Image: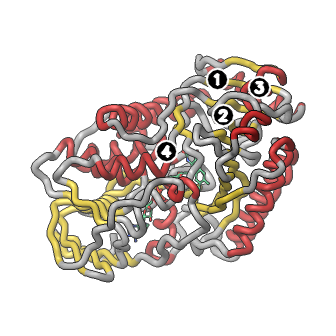
Amino acid sequence: MTSKLEFARFPAPDGVNGWWESLPPPAPAVAVSSERRYDWVVVGGGITGLCAARRLAELAPDASIALVEADRIGRTTAGRNSGFFVDLPHDISSESYSRSVEADKADVRFQRHGIDYVRSVVKQHGIECDWRDDGKFHASVNRKGHGALAHFAEGLERIEESFEWLDAAAIAKVTGTDFYEGALFTPGCSTVQPAALMRGLAASLPGNVQVFELSAVTRIEDQGLSKVLTFAGGKIVAKRVILCTNAYAATFGGHPNGLLPVYTFASMTRVMKPEEVQRLGGTRSWALIPADPMGSTVRRLITDRICVRNHFAFRPNLEVSPADLAKAKSLHQRSFDRRFPMLKDVELEYTWGGPLCLSANNGALFGRRADGVFEAVGCNGLGLSRGSASGKLIAEYALGQSSDLVRQLLNQPHPRSLPVRPIADVAVSAAIWVKEFSAGAEL
Ligand SMILES: Cc1cc2nc3c(=O)[nH]c(=O)nc-3n(C[C@H](O)[C@H](O)[C@H](O)COP(=O)(O)OP(=O)(O)OC[C@H]3O[C@@H](n4cnc5c(N)ncnc54)[C@H](O)[C@@H]3O)c2cc1C
């Protein structure tokens, strides 16, 4: 680390997060408001930071640990997603989610490690977040999509993972719509209400973790054995820091580091009335991923709402405009109408966006950034399972532990740097546009 790390961008209110809004009001936030000292500070209260702080506390019960979050825990990206804890290969830059056998197996090992860790915490603390081990459906709408699923199935066979094919009638029985021509079911995926999970993870942290919210770090100064973190309301002096700021790390120091803040968007309907639920049919809760990674993810929730996610936008300044949100909402409405013509009167109540942290080569940052400064950054679109694992493992690594998984993460490629802006902006946006266009009916 240079002797100073300046934070250039902070979480902005990117629409209204339906998961958060449908929870009871949160407990009041405690913000940094004076000067304090801790052994460790974890920056970023998403899934990665929550798992890093927990694991540090488990392994070092005598250490004092602060977890600092710029917004409210559960309101930002980790509480804004579609809630899939995906265990299987899920490379969203590939046309069928798969990579090579070796890379796919490594991903599965890594992702299951994260899922198992969070599931055990949810069970131990009885966190109410609608955790379900019900698997997911990959559904296709045409022959092209079916081809992509067949390719994905071949990838699964190569790594000896189980799956099951459903024909059009079988997937319609689950979803209530005849929109899909078939699907592939994979059993290992878990799903959650993400905002409830993040809140529950924060509320159940061990006693040696102090959580600060509405506390954005604006600068970290390296003063040798101490790191000084500055906030609007005070300072924290710590011996060691772990950075878990995902897309926000793309702006550190103001120079490109290969991390790409790409937004994706979701909308959630209002609660359906009993007669609407009946009209829809299908099962009470299901989770569906499109055959083409650029298509629409859809979940039916036990709360009788439906959540639709699609559309990507490269936003290197980490904010979206009202026009971005309006465009996303109209795409969601179109996707909803195509799938659920029987639910014409069911409005989309909430629409929001959140930044993923992608890279051109699926690389991520894991390990030591400087003396006493560690980082686990770069979700590549699958932060729930990967962030859970990398948060846990960065804490283990920072405490001097090693394991096959730590070595796997240390050896993964770093994000490949891109040409300077504005060339990178045009190239990334054009690549997204082409992929979205080719997703066609899957959207
Ligand atoms: C609509 C949508 C759907 C998605 N669906 C899925 C899905 O189904 N499954 C899946 O695995 N992933 C999904 N994702 C991606 C997933 O949400 C991310 O991969 C995940 O949130 C990454 O977790 P993280 O903790 O690494 O980063 P984040 O969740 O981005 O957390 C980083 C935290 O750092 C905080 N922060 C940043 N700067 C500062 C600062 N200066 N000071 C203090 N705090 C700071 C931020 O406020 C933020 O809370 C989706 C994302 C979106 C937007």
Q: Tag 3 or tag 2, which sits nearer the N-term?
A: 2
Answer yes or no: disc 4 within 8 Å of ligand 1: yes
For marks 4 and 3, give the one nearer the viewer: 3
Q: Which residue is disc 1 drawn over?
A: 156
The amino acid pointed to by label 3 is Ile
Please tell me how crowded label 3 is: few (under 14), some (14-19), or many (20+) other residues with Cα within 10 Å. Answer: many
Distance (Cα) linking label 4 and label 1: 21 Å
In the picture, residue 302 is in which quadrant? top right
Q: Tag 3 or tag 4, which sits nearer the N-term?
A: 3
Secondary structure of residue under mark 2 = loop
Q: Quadrant of the N terminus?
A: bottom left
Distance (Cα) linking label 1 and label 2: 8 Å
Residue lying at 84% horizontally and 49% vertically, measured from the top left: 344
Q: Which mark is residue 384?
A: 4
Mark 1 near mark 3, Cβ–Cβ under 8 Å?
no
Q: Which mark is residue 255?
A: none
Relative to 69, say whether 81 is above or below.
Answer: above
Residue lying at 64% horizontally and 41% vertically, measured from the top left: 304
In the picture, residue 285 is in which quadrant? top right
Distance (Cα) linking label 2 and label 3: 23 Å
Please tell me how crowded label 1 is: few (under 14), some (14-19), or many (20+) other residues with Cα within 10 Å. Answer: many
Q: Which residue is disc 3 drawn over?
A: 171
Mark 1 near mark 2, Cβ–Cβ under 8 Å?
yes
The amino acid pointed to by label 1 is Leu
Relative to 389, say whether 136 is above or below.
Answer: above
Q: Which residue is disc 2 drawn over?
A: 98
Mark 4 near mark 1, Cβ–Cβ under 8 Å?
no
Residue lying at 74% horizontally and 48% vertically, measured from the top left: 294
Q: Tag 3 or tag 1, which sits nearer the N-term?
A: 1
